[in-house]
Amino acid sequence: MDTLLVSHPACLQHEVPDGHPECPDRLRAVLGALEAEEFALLMRATAPLATEEQLERVHSVAHIRSMLNGEPDEGFRRIDADTCMSPGSAQAALRAAGAVVYAVDEIMAGHARNAFCAIRPPGHHAEPDTAMGFCLFNNIAIGALHARAVHGIKRPAVIDFDVHHGNGTQAMFAADPGLFYASTHQFPLYPGTGEAGERGVSGNIVNACLPEGAGSDEFRHVFFEMVMPALTQFDPDFIFISAGFDGHAGDPLAGLRLTEDDFGWATAELVRYAEDHCQARVVSSLEGGYDLGALASSTRAHVRALQCSM
């Protein structure tokens, strides 16, 4: 079994206004990076559409209807100052969520060892009733709850190393002791959530806050001393990664000083844990990352670490 790459051309059709950082060129940079010879053994698949049943495990019917029926015939529909829809956005959002669901299905069927979903729009800011922070549906949460509902996964865990806190995933997981969410993020920063004292109903939420200017040493310290011990205590049977690369020193939207090697290191730590405790089950989904060069190099480091698993 090899690493699976899941994407879909529809994810390029979610358009944004000129100058918006979450643009289609992000996905082009990611896919271009994965055309290198070292990734020739990746299995590649196109994402199916997520079903409403899959979306409803995470989102309200009202929110789903708003997203599926709310795209404009032309131009843009503004949801908030950061988030918009264009013609094609609903299809892109359904393919993005469907990619994570499909990756889960392929791993549980024994067809792949782990997977990376190269998709947009991203998802970890989307709350049960609200699209925000560039996100329409919470792709990673949809995949995690699909694993539990359909495949009997008992204790899915999401690890999020995007520079922004995944408020949506935390909101969906905090009250359920069978779900785990850990985030390393710059704080304070958008969206303003993710304080260390936010612990969930049973310590199932871990927020490892990093100050502006923090770099590799600080990131690896909180990952090793906070995230991994809490993950071990939770004892998951499937690991999901919200793979945001906007903590890179070159990223324009935040102030951490990470490198692509840090993302590769964190991924390798999670892959090793999954091999020992989760039958190697890992699904990663693209979140942020807005400097195209840093995004490409970070993606290569991340997927390289997925492929180097046993």
Image (tube, rainbow, N blue to C red):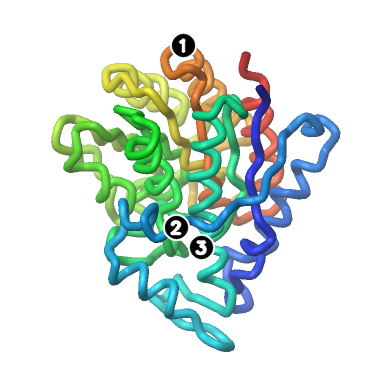
In the image, residue 7 sits, relative to residue 152, either above or below, namely below
Tell me the residue that label 2 is attached to: 51
Q: Who is closer to the viewer here, 47 or 125?
A: 47
Location of residue 126 in the rendering, given as x and y in whole percent from the top left corner: 37, 59
Amino acid type at mark 1: Asp
Res 138 → quadrant: bottom left
Q: Left of 9 or right of it: where is 202?
A: left
The answer to the question of whether label 2 and label 1 lie on touching residues, with beta carbons closer than 8 A, is no
Quadrant of the rendering where the C terminus is positioned: top right
Identify the element where label 1 is drawn. Answer: helix
Q: Nearer the viewer, mark 2 or mark 1?
A: 2
Quadrant of the rendering where the N terminus is positioned: top right
- Measure how far apart labels 1 and 3 are at the Cα level: 33 Å
Tell me the residue at 31%/28% (across/down). Answer: 155
Chain-order first, disc 1 or disc 3: 3
| Farthest top residue in view | 276
In the image, residue 40 sits, relative to residue 235, either above or below, namely below
In the image, residue 92 sits, relative to residue 217, either above or below, namely below
Tell me the residue that label 3 is attached to: 93
Is residue 190 at least partly visible in the picture? no
Tell me the residue at 40%/42% (across/down). Answer: 185
Location of residue 161 in the rendering, given as x and y in whole percent from the top left corner: 46, 39
The answer to the question of whether label 1 and label 3 lie on touching residues, with beta carbons closer than 8 A, is no
- Measure how far apart labels 2 and 3 are at the Cα level: 11 Å
- Measure how far apart labels 2 and 1 are at the Cα level: 33 Å
Tell me the residue at 36%/73% (across/down). Answer: 65
Q: Left of 226 or right of it: where is 88?
A: right
